[in-house]
Amino acid sequence: MEINKIYNEDCKVTLSKMQDKFIDGIITSPPYNINTERSDGYYNNGYSHIDGLSENDYLELRTSEFKQFSRVLNDKGVICYNISYAKENPILPTLLVTKIHNETDLTIADIICWKKSIAMPFQSSSTKLSRITELIYIFVKKNQLHTFNTNKKVSKINEKTGQKFYKYYKNFIEAKNNDGYICKLKASYSQDLVNQLIDIYFPTNSLIYDPFTGIGTTQLSCINNKCKYIGSEIDKEHYKIATMRINSVS
């Protein structure tokens, strides 16, 4: 397994090459399974053949990935998993998080609310709200719920008791929607967001994996924050863009 590389393949293939406890963490945003929402393909992000699954198939696929995430994650590692909901099935992320908790050795340690710069979608519905926030689920191994790694800095120590107090970290992050790169991938997040996640959870030189690399946002933030990376991207066009963007800064 080569470090600081994106693999143009399904994440299951990349995961199969990793040894146990190989990575320090994951930062990613998976397909939201919204391709079939509209007949005009507005939400087609280039994953039409894998992003129109039944609810059960979607939950089974994502959970099977998490079982592999757990295997390759070191004991104190952290998974930052950004997933929103579609108006046709708003409960889907909640069902997925519950299934992951029940069927793997991973659980939720925190839930971060990400406030974006621009609310989407525009108001074309008489009932649904425009979403200016999305959730980022922080998964850790159940037996490390109170001992997993973070990058939190100590602000002071009580001289009498030795009690440590930490710099103020909130479960609310304000960050841009994306980096402004125009391509067919509509649902990318921003380096601004990833930088803040790394600041909380990943010390320098951490090895971070993104199984749904898209156009390379996670990897660019890893480079900026002196972390190592591995990525998987199944779409050839997205993979080429990600490689180009990384090469331009490397």
Image: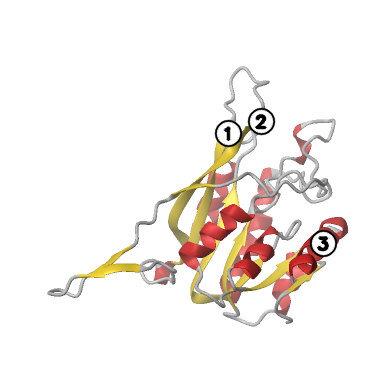
Real-space Cα separation, disc 3 to disc 2, in angstroms: 27 Å
- Which one is in front, 170 or 148? 170
Q: Quadrant of residue 67?
A: bottom right
- Which one is in front, 132 or 248? 248
Q: Which residue is labeled 1 in the image?
A: 131
- Residue found 83% across the figure and 57% down from its top: 235
First in residue order: circle 3 vs circle 1:
1
Q: Amino acid at mark 1?
A: Arg
Image coords of residue 219 (percent x, y): 68, 65
Image coords of residue 76 (percent x, y): 46, 74
Real-space Cα separation, disc 1 to disc 2, in angstroms: 7 Å
Describe the element under mark 1 as helix, strand or loop: strand
First in residue order: circle 3 vs circle 2:
2
In this view, 188 is above or below 242 = above
Question: Residue farthest to the front?
Answer: 249
- Which one is in front, 62 or 28? 28
Describe the element under mark 3 as helix, strand or loop: helix
Q: Which mark is residue 239?
A: 3
Q: Which mark is residue 58?
A: none
In this view, 41 is above or below 181 = above
Question: Residue farthest to the left?
Answer: 160
Question: Badge 3: how crowded within 10 Å, few (<14), some, or many (20+)?
Answer: many
Q: Is residue 225 visible?
A: yes
Describe the element under mark 2 as helix, strand or loop: loop
Q: Quadrant of residue 116?
A: top right
- Residue found 68% across the figure and 64% down from its top: 220
Q: Amino acid at mark 3?
A: Tyr
- Residue found 74% across the figure and 81% down from its top: 2
Report the quarter where the N terminus lies: bottom right
Q: Is residue 106 visible?
A: no
Q: Which mark is residue 121?
A: 2
- Residue found 68% across the figure and 57% down from its top: 61
